[in-house]
């Protein structure tokens, strides 16, 4: 299994994993590879800029360090996934553009999404199109 990490799952994994659920930690630990969306890199940069998180180095070198791990790969955002993100049902899907783009990336690549976000988990359960691990 090659999962896609939601932004918070990425941050928690890199900080030692103590905030991950057992299922999420196991999925990451047993994966040959974990994928990271460029949207998560953008979101982490934004969170650091506004002071919601602290990074131990400038964002560019922090991101480079993430991808030094041979198991970390980029989940490229395609035009199709961007279109799907925009077309997700507004009545049932969270409005956060980052969540929409990450979810649509998991959908396009047909890979599990590791997230604690209850809104994403509820949507995935109802839609049946993305396997969510938490």
Image (cartoon, grey):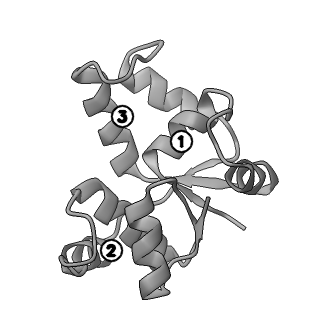
Left or right of 1 on screen, residue 110:
left
Count all numbered tags in the image, as a single digit: 3
Q: Which residue is mark 2?
A: 81
Nearer the viewer's eye, disc 1 or disc 2?
1
- Check contact, mark 3 vs mark 1: CB within 8 A: yes
Nearer the viewer's eye, disc 3 or disc 2?
3
Q: Residue furthest right?
A: 30
Give the structural element (helix, strand or loop) at label 2.
helix
Give the structural element (helix, strand or loop) at label 1.
helix
- Residue 10 circle label: 1
Q: Nearer the viewer, residue 57 or 64?
A: 57
Spatial CA distance of label 1 from label 2 is: 20 Å
Give the structural element (helix, strand or loop) at label 3.
helix
- The local crowd at label 1, few if under 14, some if 14 to 19, many if 20 or more residues have their Cα within 10 Å, is many
Q: Nearer the viewer, residue 105 or 20?
A: 20
Please state the horizontal and vertical placement of residue 53, each as a whole percent of the image. 37, 22
Give the mark nearest the N terminus, 3 or 2: 3
Give the mark nearest the N terminus, 3 or 1: 1
Left or right of 21 on screen, residue 36:
left
Q: Residue at x 47, y 68 (%)?
A: 121
Q: Nearer the viewer, residue 25 or 72?
A: 25
Spatial CA distance of label 3 from label 1 is: 10 Å
Give the mark nearest the N terminus, 1 or 2: 1
For residue 18, above or below residue 77:
above
- Check contact, mark 3 vs mark 2: CB within 8 A: no
């Amino acid at each position: 299994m090659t999962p896609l990490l939601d932004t918070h799952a990425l941050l928690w994994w890199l900080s030692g994993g103590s905030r991950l659920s057992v299922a999420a930690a196991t999925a990451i630990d047993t994966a040959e590879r974990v994928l990271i969306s460029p949207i998560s890199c953008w979101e982490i940069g934004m969170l650091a800029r506004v002071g919601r998180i602290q990074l131990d180095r400038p964002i560019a070198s922090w991101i480079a360090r993430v991808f030094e791990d041979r198991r970390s790969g980029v989940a490229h955002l395609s035009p199709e996934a961007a279109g799907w993100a925009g077309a997700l049902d507004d009545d049932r899907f969270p409005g956060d553009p980052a969540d929409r783009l990450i979810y649509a990336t998991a959908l396009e690549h047909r890979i599990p999404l590791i997230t604690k976000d209850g809104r994403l988990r509820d949507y995935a359960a109802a839609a049946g199109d993305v396997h969510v691990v938490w």
